[in-house]
Image: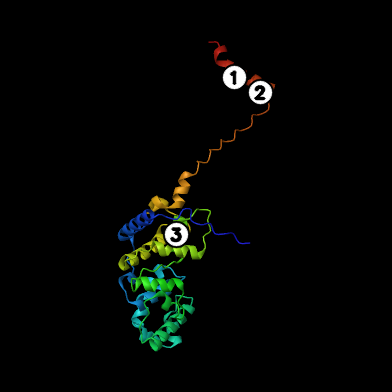
Amino acid sequence: MPPKSIPLRPPPSAETIRTFQQRLLRWFRRHGRDLPWRKTRNPYHVLVSEVMLQQTQVSRVEQYYPGFLARYPTLDRLAAASPAEVRESWDGLGYYRRAANLHRFAVTVVEDMKGEVPRSSEALRRLPGIGRYTAGAIASFAFEQPEAAVDTNVSRVIRRAFFSPRAKPSERRVWGLAATLVPPRGKTAWAFNQAIMELGALICTARVARCGKCPVSGVCRGVIAASRRPPTPAVPAARSPSPPFSPAAAAGRNTRRALPSGRSG
C-alpha cells in the first residue's frame, strides 16, 4: 500500500506567504538571469522557449533559441514548414518529439484558431503537446495570468519550504499550494513564477540546497526543522590499547629515567 501524503501542519499563514513572496521577488530583481525569453510576451516565442527547456540545459537553449526564431519568426511560418524541415532545425537539441509537438501546435492554432494562441491554461491544455506545466507557463509568461506553473524546480522548492522533511506530498497538493503562492496581480505573478523557478535552478538545487544563500530560508520549514534538531553528540576518539605488561620493558624504562641523576662526573 503506497504511503499516505502527510498534510501541511499547519498550512502557511497569510503572513508567511507574503514574506515568502516579498523576499523571493526582491532576490530575483537582484540576481535573476538575463535570459532572452524573459524579454518577450509573445506567446509563440514563450512556447518555443518552454518546449526547448524541457530536458535541456539553459545554456544550450540560449544557443538554439535565436536561430530557431530567426528561421520561424511566427506561428504561420512554423505551420507552413514541413515536419522534416522543423526536425532539421531542431537538430542538436535532441528529444525530437518536442519539435513534432511544437509543429502540430502551430498547425492547429493557425488552421483552427486563426493564429490566436489561447490565453487561459484550460484552453491551452486542449492543444497538441501542451501539458499542465506548459499551459500554466504560457498563461503566466505570455499573458501575465496569475496561474501556477510547477516544474521540477518549483516542486522542489515548495516541498522543501512548506512541507515537513518527512512528508511526501501528492502532486495535487503541491499544485494547490503553488496556486495559493502566486500573487493575484499579473506582472507580479509573472515575476514570482520566474523567481521561484530561478531559486530552484540556482539555490535550492536537486544536488545541494544552498540554504545560507537562500532569500526565503527564514520561512523555510526544512531550514527551521534542521535548526531545531539536537546536535549530534561528539564520538570520543578511540584510544589505542595499552601494550601488555612486560617486566623487562618496565625495568628498562626505570633504568633510563634514573640515568641522569645517577651519573657521576
- Residue 96 appears in the rendering: no
Q: Quadrant of residue 57?
A: bottom left
Disc 2 from disc 1: Cα separation: 11 Å
Q: Compare residues 53 and 175 and report the one nearer the observer.
A: 175
Q: Amino acid at mark 3?
A: Ile
**For marks 3 and 2 on the same chain, the one whose residue lies earlier in the sequence:** 3
- SS label for mark 3: helix
Against 167, is 53 above or below?
below
**Residue at 33%, 69% in the rendered image:** 38
Which residue is at the far top? 265
Q: Amino acid at mark 1?
A: Arg
Q: Quadrant of residue 2?
A: bottom right
Residue, disc 1: 256
Q: Nearer the viewer, mark 1 or mark 3?
A: 3
Is residue 61 rendered to the left or right of residue 240? left
**For marks 2 and 1 on the same chain, the one whose residue lies earlier in the sequence:** 2
- SS label for mark 1: helix
Q: Nearer the viewer, mark 3 or mark 2?
A: 3
Disc 1 from disc 3: Cα separation: 71 Å
**For marks 1 and 3 on the same chain, the one whose residue lies earlier in the sequence:** 3
**Pointer 1 with pointer 3, Cβ within 8 A:** no
Measuring from the top left, give residue 144's x and y in whole percent: 33, 71
Residue, disc 2: 249
Residue, disc 3: 158
**Residue at 32%, 64% in the rendered image:** 188
